[in-house]
Amino acid sequence: MNYDPRVMVPHDRRIGLLFGGAPRVPRMVELAQQAERAGFESVWMAETRMTRDGFTPLAAIASATERIGLGTGIVNVYTRGAVVMAVSFATLAEIAPGRVIVGLGPGSPRVLAPQGYSWSKPLTRLREYTQVMGPLLRGEDVTFAGEAVSLQDARIEDVLADNTSEIGDEADLPIYFGVTGRAAVELAGELADGVLYNVCLPVEYLARARQAIERGAARAGRAAADVDIAMVILTAADLDSEVGKHRAHAFCSLYLSLFPNIAAETGVDPDVIAETRAAFHGHGLEAAQRVLPLDVVDRLCAAGTPAECQSRLDEYRAAGVSLPVISALEGSIELAIEHLR
């Protein structure tokens, strides 16, 4: 049976857990086991920083769990070729049949540039990777001449060749796009099974994104309701509300300083963002925190006591998020798993 996120748990109580590159892999496995016991639907592994890759931790988690979905949240469409990308997902699906979610995204210039990749034609790459992924996973010979992807009689051989009758049963892996901007979200509406919105975005963002999903879906002649809406929500739970909020504030100060495309969608005064960024690059994180108002935390995160975090998750649900995926800061992960639903 293929992974179907919408039948795993009651619709209004779906929840996932994302690891953003930390903690150490053995600890991730322990936390994923706890999340599975607590009824979490899925666990996601980000490959957006040069820390840990997106597949090895999920393979370890797959071997130590039984039911929980396993998603890349996300891997970019630059640093792996399309065939290697498909092979990686096929191999993971062999370890955890019926549980794998393909999370793809354009990545970030900040992460790609140090590796020697220019962020050119990101949406073209995302489209073309998506176009070849299904045929490759079905074990077909794929010839494709695109702007970013060029394949000549490419075929996955060793992982899937033993029993071609089962290839179709595991090949239709759901594809989620990790995207933020209007054009990218429209592409998700056109091509993807789901979308995984970024961290540090306000509830108000969802209405704009919904319009983009609808435009993309209409372009493809499909229903917008067919696109599952997931969102990574920065979570900092603590029995002391102030401690949780200050942890989240430090993260926001860092994140908005480094990722201007996300900052532009937050609704925070652009002058404040510019001042925060200048303070960070000039004097460090503490200086940035002194500029960015603390109240942005309540706008962009789920932070404070577990009850405050739960209330915030439910606000995102009410605004259209079917699957909140919590990205819990260090020191708050176990508390979040225990209390948030």
Image (cartoon, rainbow, N blue to C red):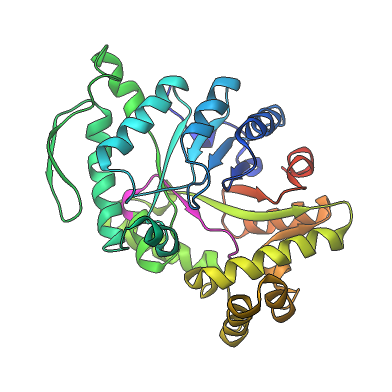
Image point 57% across, 24% down: which residue?
67
Can residue 186 be seen from the camera position used here? yes
Image point 54% across, 41% down: which residue?
44
Residue 228 in the figure: left or right of residue 112: right
Where does the N terminus fall, quadrant-wise? top left
Asked if 209 appears above or below 130 in the picture, the reply is below
Residue extending farthest to the bottom is 271
Highlighted magenta segment, given as a residue range? 190-203
Asked if 212 appears above or below 139 in the picture, the reply is below
Q: Point out residue 286 in the picture as x, y percentages from the top left corner.
A: 72, 73
Q: Is residue 192 part of the magenta span, yes or no?
A: yes
Q: Point out residue 94 in the picture as x, y percentages from the top left corner.
A: 40, 20
Task: Report the front residue among 306 and 74.
Answer: 74
Q: Point out residue 275 in the picture as x, y percentages from the top left corner.
A: 61, 85
Residue 27 in the figure: left or right of residue 137: right
Residue extending farthest to the right is 240
Q: Point out residue 265 in the picture as x, y percentages from the top left corner.
A: 52, 72
